Amino acid sequence: MNDWKRSGGLRDGVLVAALILFWLAATAWARPLMLPDEGRYVSVAWEMLRSGDWLTPTLNGLPFFHKPPLFYWITGAALSVGGLTEIAARAASIAGATLGALSLYLFTRHWCGLASARRALWVLLAQPLFFVGGQFANLDMLVAGCITATILALAHAALCFEQGLAYRRALLLAYGLSALGVLAKGLIGFVIPAMVVGFWLVLRRRWRTVWALMSPTGAMLFLLGAAPWFLAMQQRFDGFLHYFFVVQHFQRFAAGGFNNVQPAWFYPVVLALMSLPCLLWSRSLLTQRYFVGIAAVSPQHAAVRQLMGLAVFCVVLFFSMPQSKLLGYIFPAVAPLAWLMADASGASATGASRQRWWWATLAFSAVLGLGVVAGLVWDQRHSTRNLGLALREYRADGEPVYFIRSYHYDVPFYARLQDPVVVVDDWDDPEIALRDNWRKEMSDAGGFSRQRAEQLLMTPVALPAALCRQPVSWVVASEALRKRYDFLAQAEAVLTLRGETLWRVDVRQPAQLSALRCAGTPNGG
């Protein structure tokens, strides 16, 4: 460690981390939160911050156990420091991307040299999947960074052990990072690293190394990091462990009925397309010689090549098996694939003209990523920020808010609501359990707090009486519902955004009072 510090490694690592942070944060503020994912997860973090309960994630005041809490902890802390801004809302994803990229750089520098490390870093930073995913506020890049760092820490410990060097600190670091991965998104935080490194060691027939990585101290560190939150939630909410692991892990992985069903070839095609044009330099990846030909010259470089190839293969295979396939699931494969593309292109990109073409391909990839972000800035169809800002501007403290047959995740965030809204829908509808959407999320969450759900999940027949109890209420609903609810025709439409309208309902107005049939009016009762 002292030699590493004297060689400038610490300063180099800090500068690289600053570069990654600057690259991702430079545009992370420029666009509103995107629905549904960014609005959902940031809203949960905002509720955690405003309630002061840093243990139980809640969605609209109801216990929300689709995912563990690390993203919410990081995001809530960032919101408390940076305010309710988009860049603070994306801090967890930026942190995950930085962790993964920095780990790749430091690992490659140690085992393959500074030039290879810089080359791998440039390729990774230019990848559109990395650039956009690193500033997209959901859990995928955070867990991808934890998985990448865990794999590389385990591999570093293994290679050090094989060369007779000190390895236990790196091994304990890997176990600790794995615990963070579990707190980021669940079991994949240790399943994928164990699968990748396990296959890598078996392929290389390093049986002694396998046993060396089995650390009782590391296992204790892992349990101390990952287990307390799960045990606390089970103690608070009966049935939590079954819901979190059986329903949200095993059933989501093995069963159908979830969103975005795609064929088995989805991820290979996505990775290939999103890695263009850098992938064009990497035809040697398809040859056996690439992975074994260098072994006689540099055994450790060959071992790293095999590790990166297995990491891409295992991640793609693992996430291709379920029917449900979301783009972010493949993020753990982006860093090792970038390393492979950088390494494979290193041998072929010799000569001034080839070097210029290599840099041109990186620039083109970077422009693609910037273009995606620019497109999302221009096209804000997946955001209801303006509804939230209008509600924040016109609503007075204490005036209740109702969402009818919809739940806009980002509205409470942008409106700075201090209390949950009331969501109006047919909550006895058996179809709710069959579709993986916001209605099922609310219904499942209500099952963990039925008393709270009775207050926040309202049926349409109870809505008029609830509106009559307050002088002024606010309603967010589709413009098409104006014909179904007579009182909306009499309400003031403050803002309409792509078919969704914010209404101000004032029962002090005679027409509104009559339309709601409040008690004490000619039509009341």
Image (cartoon, rainbow, N blue to C red):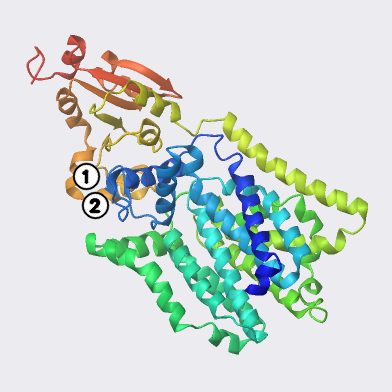
Q: Residue furthest top?
A: 510
Q: Position of residue 61 (x, y in %)?
A: 27, 44
The answer, for residue 325, to whether it is visible in the render is no
**Quick check: 335 above or below 520?**
below
Q: Which residue is mark 2?
A: 447
In what element is the residue under mark 1? helix
Residue at 71% across, 76% down? 303
Q: Which residue is mark 1?
A: 453
Amino acid type of the residue tagged 1 in the rendering: Ala
Q: Position of residue 479 (x, y in %)?
A: 37, 22
Residue at 21% across, 51% down? 449
Q: Earlier in the sequence, mark 1 or mark 2?
A: 2
**Quick check: 501 above or below 60?**
above
Residue at 57% across, 74% down? 154
Q: Measure the alpha-carbon separation of dots 1 and 2.
A: 8 Å
**Quick check: 507 above or below 206?**
above
